[in-house]
Image: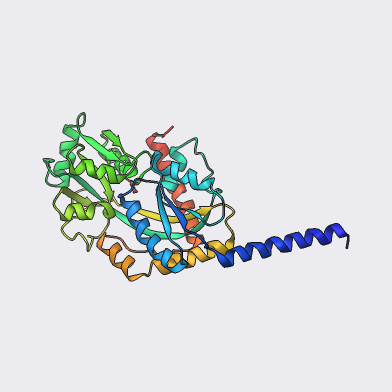
Amino acid sequence: MSMLKVMAAAVAAFGVLAGSAVADTYPSRPITLVVPFSAGGPTDTVSRLVAEAMGKDLGQQIVIENVGGAGGTLGAGRVAKSDPDGYTLLLHHIGMATSVPLYRKLPYDTLNAFEYVGLVTEVPMTIVGRGSLEPTDLKSLIDYVKTNKDTVTYANAGVGSASHLCGLLFMSRLETPLTTVPYKGAGPAMTDLVGGQVDFICDQTTNTTSQIRAGKIKAYAATVKERLASLPDIPTAAEAGLPDFNLTVWHGMYAPKGTSPEIVAKLTAALQKALKDPNVVKRFADLGTTPSTEAEATPDALKAKLVSEIERWTPVIKAAGVYAD
Ligand code: MLT
């Protein structure tokens, strides 16, 4: 065997050794988890609970970095171009799929820019209004919106966000386009809703439950087939007169493409453990959601979900003819 071949084999063996040696000591410093929406919102709430539990298991702090804007695509783009060393991760939701048809010039190739760690949770949504909004039930909200379509304001977390998608479905069902007020996240949108600056939003229970319980906002319906144990007084959309209006927001964790399989496997194992953590389970239930199962918190399950959701939403968004750029 030529000297060159021997050296090439040695270098390759060293690479693998180095890779697994690195994986053995991973993580040796704090990890950054990018949340592509503002602090205090639904995705931030889920991320902080999971990060704390995963950090305990991995023996290193997981620090949240909020990179809001463009419906979550700015934060996703930040991670797509990060070093694949396991120290920069992303927790994003259904927006990862809807941004594919919505943004014709995405700064990354969604299906090829990331490694998949696993699914995290699937959060129901609620249609809610500012506390002083006149309508007291969904039917009268729909009439109110149609009558005042030139003045009613609908808040969302940017084109491609879950609140944007739910709003799009609601407006197309009512055949009534409305004035939308975009934010960098549902966190600041909720602050303005409670303050009465905007009229209504369809938002995740992880962001609305505490405000609904405190009586600070009006709740009209939950976008699920069965009532939520955490909000038993809130009717389903079907019960409230809007049949087949079901939408839940799945969330997944990603790493930059090229992150080693050993490191991804460690992250997946830590995620699975975190989703069984009693505090995470209790907090999720209190916020109207449940952790993904062990089978769902896997790379294959997340990839399959992303692929099927891109296929599901592309025709819907194309039919609506709304694009972010
Ligand atoms: C957020 O955390 O702000 C959201 O997930 C917003 C959204 O997608 O509606």
Front residue (pair 77, 290): 77
In the image, taking residue 227 as reference, residue 267 lies left or right, namely right
Number of marks: 0
- Quarter holding the N terminus? bottom right
Q: Residue furthest front?
A: 29
In the figure, 272 relative to 307: above or below? below
In this figure, which colouring scheme has been used for the structure?
A: rainbow
Quadrant position of residue 295: bottom left
Residue at point 54%, 64% (across, down)? 26
Asked if residue 59 shows in the view, the reply is yes
Can you give x and y, in whole percent of width and height, for residue 195 in the image? 18, 41
Q: Quadrant of the C terminus?
A: top left
Where residue 255 appears, as percent x and y from the top left, is 51, 54
* Residue 294 visible within the image: no
Outermost residue on the right side: it is 2
Q: x, y percentage for residue 69?
A: 39, 40
Q: Residue furthest top?
A: 150
| Residue placed most toward the observer, 87 or 281 | 87
Compared with residue 18, is residue 186 higher up or lower down, i.e. above or below?
A: above
Instruction: Judge left or right: residue 217 versus residue 107.
Output: left
**Residue at image location 49% in from the left, 63% down from the top:** 267
Estimate the x, y position of residue 7 in percent, counting from the top left: 81, 59
In this rendering, would 211 be left or right of 254? left
The image quarter in which residue 190 lies: top left
